[in-house]
Amino acid sequence: MDKAQQKISILGAGLVGSLLSISLAKRGYNVTIFERRPDMRKAGAIGGRSINLALSHRGLKALENVGLKDKIQESCIPMPGRMIHDVEGNLDFQPYGKEGEFINSVSRGGLNWLLMNEAEANGVQIMFEHKCIDVDFNTATSVFDNGNTAEADFLFGGDGAFSALRNAMQKTDRFNFSQEYISAGYKELTMPATANGDYAIDPSALHIWPRGEYMLIALPNLDKSFTCTLFFPFEGKTSFESIRTEADVEVFFHEKFKDAVPHLPNLKKEFLENPTSSLITVRCDPWVKGKTALIGDSAHAIVPFYGQGMNSGFEDCHVFDQLLEKHGKINDDLLKEYQALRIPDGNAIADLALYNFIEMRDKVADEKFVLQKKIEKKLNQLYPEKWIPLYSMVTFSDLRYSEAIARGNKQQAIMDDVLSRPAIEKDWKNLDFEAIIDEVHQ
Ligand code: FAD
């Protein structure tokens, strides 16, 4: 069948569904997206304008694949490192990678808006206010809450962490599924531009206030504001549950985040009124059933601590597109390969993201962690192909996540040994770096 006659349905016009639609339309498919919500572009303002995300190499590579990298980078703010704020307000800038490597702060709404516009420019039809409530896997038919149904030759679920397609799959035999909420949730707070119209803090960093069990982070926006996110336990002695009044908020923030407080004029109101959201990891297997497949968060929702949820979803789209190039059409061989490649990688980035919460909220403030970063930087300078820090493998390369985690574990075991040597703080520059590299390749 001619691709133009092949109908593809995608559930969800979020970041991943919209990008997927572009790559499929560019290959000649007839694509329709069904989105639960109304068209955010018609409201005249970008929904959640200042809510931002970190976009990095994998996401950019997928955008480049559809010719959108440069356009999107125009509205990105580069963040070459993390700026650590200690309790006293002292600052420590830690570069993320080598000179010239950075992650990008990008507006979620702005990016989604642009991707939807591009999708339509490529002939994709987006049907808003179509909430899918059921799917027939054998006929790729979706059923909507407004009474409509849509048939297709193939259907993708790009409908996020609480996917209707995945819900339908869960009712079938031999479908493996797990979901796990972590004990922390998050709340967004705004750090507006100063009275002079400037950024309140340095915009060329992702700011972190690590405090052990919890942390505050801030990413810059183009309008000179920052979006701050407090990741904080739901319950316990110091938790969303325990901080209930304006006075509680004031005391807590002055004690723990005192250098941020002067830049958060609406702190008390925002803390008490903004929603508290939960954080979930979803894993499942298979991702394909009949004439349907999961992609993005519907297949692998992860916690946000590696900044890889969207990036990994974009990489799903890129991998799928490469498989279409290889196989020529969506067939059983392509779908088998898609799952075989992406399920282990989805699981790997889910694990990495959970681990990185501990690293961000706790370890970045630790002297041993900072020393490890210095030693790893040196190893990478001396042997750029042989020693790549885990963060760089995940963020600045497109090595498979499953391979990155395996190499990262091996490197960490070696580092644990190196860091346990006596007087390492003083003597690290005299380490036998070649011997360390030999250990990796044993
Ligand atoms: P979604 O963005 O959830 O989109 C799903 C779409 O489907 C939505 O438009 C929804 O309305 C629609 N939909 C849902 N159900 C239905 C239905 N039944 N029928 C029709 N339509 C439906 N990732 C990064 O890479 N970097 C970051 O820095 C980062 N930071 C994050 C910070 C936080 C606090 C959180 C929570 C996440 C973060 N992420 C980050 C993850 C990122 O937001 C997600 O991975 C990404 O949004 C997934 O895109 P998606 O299109 O698969 O799903």
Image: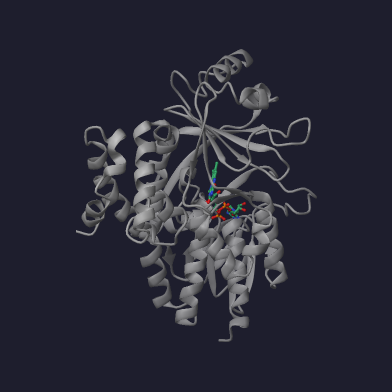
Q: Position of residue 296 (x, y in %)?
A: 50, 57
| Tag count | 0
Q: What is the residue that sits farthest to the bottom in this orientation?
A: 1
| Residue at image location 48% in from the left, 27% down from the top | 234
Q: Please give left or right for residue 239 compared with residue 423 in the image.
A: right
In this rendering, is residue 183 above or below 333?
above
Viewer-nearest residue: 132 or 278: 278
Report the colour scheme. one colour
Q: Quadrant of residue 421?
A: top left
Residue 287 visible in rendering: yes
| Residue at image location 30% in from the left, 55% down from the top | 407
| Residue at image location 75% in from the left, 54% down from the top | 41
In this rendering, is residue 310 above or below 62?
above
Q: Give the quarter of the figure containing the N terminus.
A: bottom right
Q: What is the residue that sits farthest to the front in this orientation?
A: 430
Q: Please give left or right for residue 306 compared with residue 53 in the image.
A: left
In this rendering, is residue 392 above or below 328?
above
Q: Quadrant of residue 39?
A: bottom right
Q: Position of residue 5 (x, y in %)?
A: 62, 82
Residue 175 visible in rendering: no
Q: Position of residue 86 (x, y in %)?
A: 49, 26
Q: Please give left or right for residue 344 compared with residue 61 in the image.
A: left
| Residue at image location 58% in from the left, 64% down from the top | 63
Q: Position of residue 88 (x, y in %)?
A: 52, 21
Viewer-nearest residue: 78 or 300: 78
Q: Give the quarter of the figure containing the C terminus.
A: bottom left
Q: Quadrant of residue 73?
A: bottom right
